[in-house]
Image: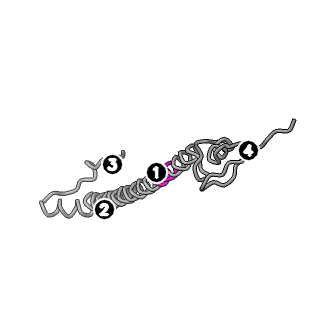
Amino acid sequence: MMEKSVYVQTPDEGLISGGVERNKVRQSRNPNPHKKNGISRMEIFLYISLLVGFIALVLVLISAKVNLSLAQQNLQNVNQKVEKIHNDNSNLKQEVSELQSSSRLQKIAQKNGLSLSNNNIRNVRK
């Protein structure tokens, strides 16, 4: 037996075999009903997640660079303070050596009327 095909014409769709509306045919052929304009909801979520992750990574990188530069500046300040303290220590050691010199001590002794007796001198070393 021969099957009879029925063609139905809708005003905006044209002829369709079997009297099925064209929209229903198209929807049944679409394997992913959530897909709109070629991009699914999952893809949109994935793209947005990747974008947010990338922005977060950039912000973390910028924050790390700022912290690194602050740490370098603090290190430079501490090194300057250490250098100043070393210079001060060297100057003070030189001043102590000058104050302890035997020629200076003899001048002070003579000025105050004291005399030097070699029998009473003892050398003490650290």
Q: Which residue is mark 1?
A: 60
Q: Earlier in the sequence, mark 2 or mark 4?
A: 4
Q: Residue at x 40, y 55 (%)?
A: 75
Determine the main secondary structure of the stretch shown in magenta: helix
Q: Inspect the image, locate mark 3, and give the three-letter code of the amino acid beneath it.
A: Asn
Q: Earlier in the sequence, mark 4 or mark 1?
A: 4
Q: CA distance from mark 4 to mark 1?
A: 66 Å
Question: Which region shows up in magenta?
Answer: 52-61
The circle drawn on residue 123 is 3
Circle 2 Cα neighbour tier, 10 Å, few/some/many (<14 / 14–19 / ≥20): few
Q: Contact (CB < 8 A) between labels 3 and 1?
A: no
Q: CA distance from mark 4 to mark 3?
A: 130 Å
Q: Earlier in the sequence, mark 3 or mark 1?
A: 1
Where 113 falls versus 39 (above or below)?
below
Image coordinates of residue 53 in percent, x first then y, are 51, 48
Using the rendered view, name the quadrant where residue 104 is placed. Answer: bottom left
Q: Which residue is mark 2?
A: 91
Dot in front, 2 or 4 = 4
Q: CA distance from mark 2 to mark 3?
A: 25 Å
Q: Earlier in the sequence, mark 2 or mark 3?
A: 2
Q: Earlier in the sequence, mark 4 or mark 3?
A: 4
Q: Inspect the image, locate mark 1, and give the three-letter code of the amino acid beneath it.
A: Val
Image coordinates of residue 33 in percent, x first then y, are 60, 42
Find out whether residue 23 is within the magenta segment.
Answer: no
Dot in front, 4 or 1 = 4
Q: Which residue is mark 4?
A: 6
